Amino acid sequence: MAYNREAYKRRDVVECSLNAVRQWMSLATRYDKLALTYRSAMALHSVLILSAVIPTS
């Protein structure tokens, strides 16, 4: 299998994103065991990611 630089860059972005989600997941599960709290933390994390990506005018 040949080394593909672009595919490796995309893979790195995905892995870093998953690591960030895992950190949020551990935070949500540490403080409360309710599924609603976990889901709320994931929604908040998604909003923060999108707010960083969307340009402000």
Image (cartoon, rainbow, N blue to C red):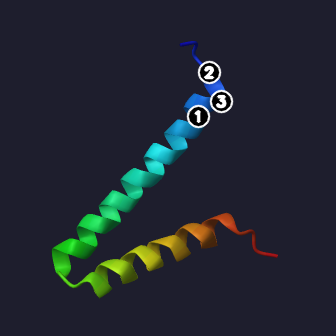
The CA span between labels 2 and 1 is 9 Å
Residue 2: % across, % down = 58, 12
38, 20: nearer the viewer: 38
Mark 1, Cα crowd under 10 Å, few <14 / some 14-19 / many 20+, is: few
Describe residue 49's horizontal placement relative to residue 22 as left or right.
right
Image position, residue 25 (x, y; %): 30, 67
Secondary structure beneath disc 1?
helix
Asked whether, in this view, residue 32 is left or right of residue 37, the answer is left
Q: Mark 2 vs mark 1: which is more N-terminal?
A: 2
Query: Could you tell me which residue is drawn at 36 percent across and 79 percent down?
Result: 39
Q: Dot 3 corresponds to which residue?
A: 6
Identity of the residue furthest to the right in this view: 57
Residue labelled with disc 2: 4
Q: Residues within 10 Å of mark 3 (few under 14, many from 20)?
A: few
Real-space CA distance between mark 3 and mark 2, rounded to the nearest whole angstrom: 6 Å
Q: Residue at x 30, y 78 (%)?
A: 38
- Closer-to-camera residue (36/9): 36
> Does 17 sit left or right of 9 as displayed?
left
- Residue 24 picture quarter: bottom left
Question: Which residue in the protein does label 1 denote?
Answer: 9
Residue type pointed to by label 2: Asn
